Each structure stands twice: as C-alpha cells, then as structure tokens.
Amino acid sequence: MEDPATPDQVLIQACREKDRTALETVFRAHLPALERLVGRLVGSRADIEDLVQDTLVTAIAAFPRFRGDAPVASWLGGIAVNLVRRHLRRPAQRRSVPLDLVPAAAEPADSAAPPDGIADGRRRVERIHLHLSALGPDRRIAFILHVVEGHPIEEIARIVGASRMAVKSRIFWARRELMARARRDPALRELAPREGS
C-alpha cells in the first residue's frame, strides 16, 4: 500500500499542473526570502522587482520538471541566483549597481549610538557595499550566499551548479579581495586585519 501524499506533496503536484491557487500559495510563502536574497545580490529596487518576477515566471514554466530533490526554497533560490548571475555579467550592471544588504528600515529607531557614530556606521556599510559590488558575479554570489545568507557550501554548490571546491575557492578569493580593498579604504582600514595577522 502506498504512503498517502503529504499536504506539501499535494501542493507541489498542483504546482506541477500549474494550478494558480497552489502557485500563489507557494510563491506567497517564499516571496520575502526571495526578495531578500535578490536584494542582497543586486541592490537596485527596480532590479529586485524585475528579477523576482523573472524568477517566478521561470519557476512556473519549470515546475512540471521539479522532482522535489531539494526544498522548494532552495530550488527557487537557485533559479533566482542563475538569473542574478546573468544580470550581473552585463558590464553596465556590474559597474553601476550597489548592494543593499541592510535596508534603512531595519535600523533601530532608538539607537543609543551618538549621531556621529550612526553616520560613521552608515558610511562604513556603504563602503562595504561598494566593495562587494566590485566582486565578480561568481565570487560575489558565493560569498553572499555563504557569509550573509548562511548557506552551507554543499547547498551553494547545488544552487550555482559548481563543485564544492569551486565554491570554497570563490568564497576564499572574495574574502581576500574584500580584505585587500578594506585595507586600502580609509573608512574601513581600521576594521581590516593586516596581511599575515
């Protein structure tokens, strides 16, 4: 006797059949995480909306082929990352798009830091975003997925379609490049460890 399908399996099967209600349910559940991920990778509000919409459209077309080997969140994240990678490889985009890792609304309203401290902190965050934006797409994506989003190496490898060693290498070189840039940046120099320490 076959095991009865779980509610999640029933929902995914309905998505495979392009059931509008099921698709809306799945997308609504995963939309905040998708927007956060894309925002951390590209920054520009207009680009976030376009890339998230492209992700959902691509997912609708791809759902019939979704086997369920990975969680839906990882699968959607993989689609988004691939679209972002293509987007970032456009030369004009790579030069002009800053990252938006920390939305302004996330700052506490009653911060105990003095106004000068808050302004210095914002400047540092802006500088860090600028340096992250200068990384090549593959390094930038691997670094943000691992360091900012907290994904394990194995999951990143699956999402970006690379080996574990390639992902580790991208993260290593991204860290190294960011530290070198921070050491040359007067606003960040004191935060970056010296080479060899």
Image: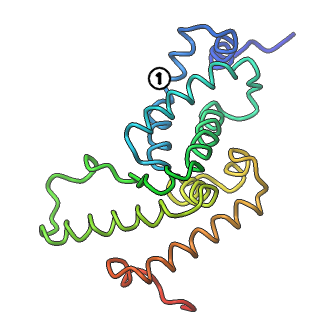
Q: Amino acid at mark 1?
A: Arg
Q: Quadrant of residue 47?
A: top left
Foreground residue among 29 and 171:
171
Quadrant (top left, top right, bottom left, bottom right) of the N terminus: top right
At horizontal 63% and vertical 35% (from top left) the residue drawn is: 79
x, y (%) of residue 118? 19, 66
x, y (%) of residue 87? 56, 43
Foreground residue among 90 and 167:
90
x, y (%) of residue 151? 60, 52
Q: Is residue 165 above or below residue 60?
A: below
Q: How many marks?
A: 1
Q: Is residue 197 above or below residue 78?
A: below
At horizontal 58% and vertical 22% (from top left) the residue drawn is: 57
Tag 1 secondary structure: helix
Q: Quadrant of residue 135?
A: bottom right
Q: Which residue is mark 1?
A: 28
Residue placed furthest toward the right: 1
